[in-house]
Amino acid sequence: MKISRRSLIGAIGTLVAAPTVLRAQASAHVVILGGGFGGASMARALRRGSPDIRVTLIERDQLYHTCPFSNGVLGGMWTLDHISFGYDALAEEGIEVIHGEAREIDAGQKTIVMADGARVSGDIMVLAPGIQFDWTAIDGLSQEAAEIMPHAWAAGPQTQLLRDQLVAMDDGGLVVVAIPAPPFRCPPGPYERISLIAHYLKQEKPASKILVLDAQDNFSKQPLFEEAWASLYPGMVERIPGSEAGAVRSVDAGAMRISTDFDDVTAAVANIIPPQKAAQILIDAGLDDGLGWCPVDPVGFESLVASDVHILGDAALAGDMPKSGFSANMQAKSCALAILNKLAGRPTEPSKLINVCYSLAAPEYGFSVADIFTQGPEKIALLESEGRITAVGAPASIHAAEAEYAKSWYATITAEMFG
Amino acid sequence: VWEVATRLQFIAALAAMFGLGISIASAADGAQLAQACSSCHGLEGRGGDSIPPLAGLSEEELFSRLKELSQPSDEATIMPRLLRGYDEDELAALAAYFAGVAQ
């Protein structure tokens, strides 16, 4: 049996430093920016770990819409209400929830400056504000154009807009889904979206087609998606990969025209997902170190640029971990432990983290990628590179079970965050 | 910051002085490893919707089930893919942790 170094250090640390521990924990204030899978999970993990530390969560919106399961809204499986969550349970646990727009991060002072000029300062900051869209990457694309050609890659009104457009479309219409080059939030997400839009069209508008203009050549769970499309939606989905000039170069929202280097198409509904990078507030603070994403320590997720500033979720450069809700929640719990250890004067040893991303190809047809990661020494590294996904050719019973688990995971993780 | 080797020597010496038990060490490891399980199996493994609970089973039962599930089978879905990333000590630590969750 091997002896855990961490536990021994922890036990010794407790013996030596007990009075300091109590003082540090009682007075510590952790300020969290962003109430999504990273931030909301972090707030509650800290509260569960210690009733004494002060936890403040800054989130712009009163209602959070999860990106996971938002494709089900597009497919008509459930409505936007099903993916909407408020922060009452967090407030009831004594987490100070501030709804407002953050304007600036002062990393040195561990302070968030709000749009109204108010300053929220802590001893430790956790930043999980997610992504921003790079509107300059595609000619003609802008926030205004996205009201006509929705990205629906931040769930909420954009999800509803795209759903409404699909419902209003005539049978026989062309739906274009444009996918950017990686890295982007939720690598399998666009392909799940294509599947669930196809599920809706097959039932309601079976003469319609989906054209996928993809900047990528290969994609997450590709053999499983292609198998599902061939069996569930034959002839409905056509995909142009990056190597055949699939990347969208320009759009004309007024004319519903989408152009690649090779072709121009006119769509009835256009879902243009722009390229992405870390939220601008992080880049303005220099926390991306010029990389577009924020480098962090593989154990503890502390910024490599600023001490006592931890960065989680989609905005972080978290080694091999994908930008997923599952990953952000996993990172939050791991980071919360590191913060609690630090406040107690204990080191945190590396452990193993996981990511499971389920995708639905139809309401009762699921599959997954399941990964284990080691923390460090250089980065968060994928442990097994083979056999990560559901077997191709698996029977319907396996896909039904995985669809059931996907729904169960969603209920459980959202209860952990908001319930 | 100490060099790792120096730290390990110091820890070993202190551990000998205080006579710290090995079971404490593996339970602590288990708690940290078990953070990965909660978004499907519920906080402290108390169960999540249609995904079964882990808490409430005996350590022996959990350990043998985890070992069994780390091998692929026709009925298994994601668990063999995840558990192959954990060694026997880690599975034992997880079993000890979930067996110790107060009911």
Image (spheres, rainbow, N blue to C red):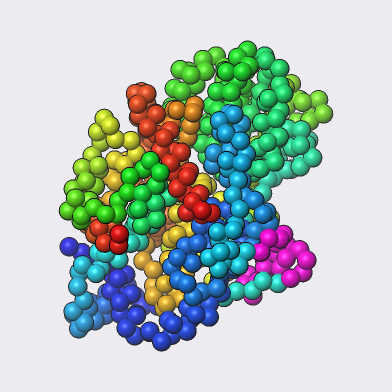
Residue B46, x across and y down, in percent: 35, 53
Pick the front one: A175 or A64: A64
Q: Residue A246, located in which quarter of the rendered image?
A: top right
Residue A122, x across and y down, in percent: 60, 74
Asked whether the viewer can see residue A190, the reply is: no
Could you tell whether B93 is left or right of A159 in the image? left
Q: Residue A95, located in which quarter of the rendered image?
A: bottom right
Pick the front one: A304 or A123: A123
Q: Is A324 placed above or below A263 here?
A: below
Pick the front one: A345 or A172: A172
Q: Residue at x 71, y 60 (%)?
A: A100
Could you tell whether B19 is left or right of A389 in the image? left
- Asked if the magenta segment contains residue B80, the reply would be no
Q: Residue at x 41, y 87 (%)?
A: A19
Residue A289, x across and y down, in percent: 61, 60
Q: Is B64 placed above or below A53 here?
A: above
For the image shown, how many numbered marks are present on the structure? 0
Residue B30, x across and y down, in percent: 30, 60
Q: Quadrant of the N terminus of chain A?
A: bottom left
Q: Residue at x 47, y 78 (%)?
A: A25
The magenta stretch is A98-118
Asked whether the viewer can see residue A137, the reply is: yes
Q: Residue at x 51, y 15 (%)?
A: A234
- Asked if the magenta segment contains residue A99, the reply would be yes
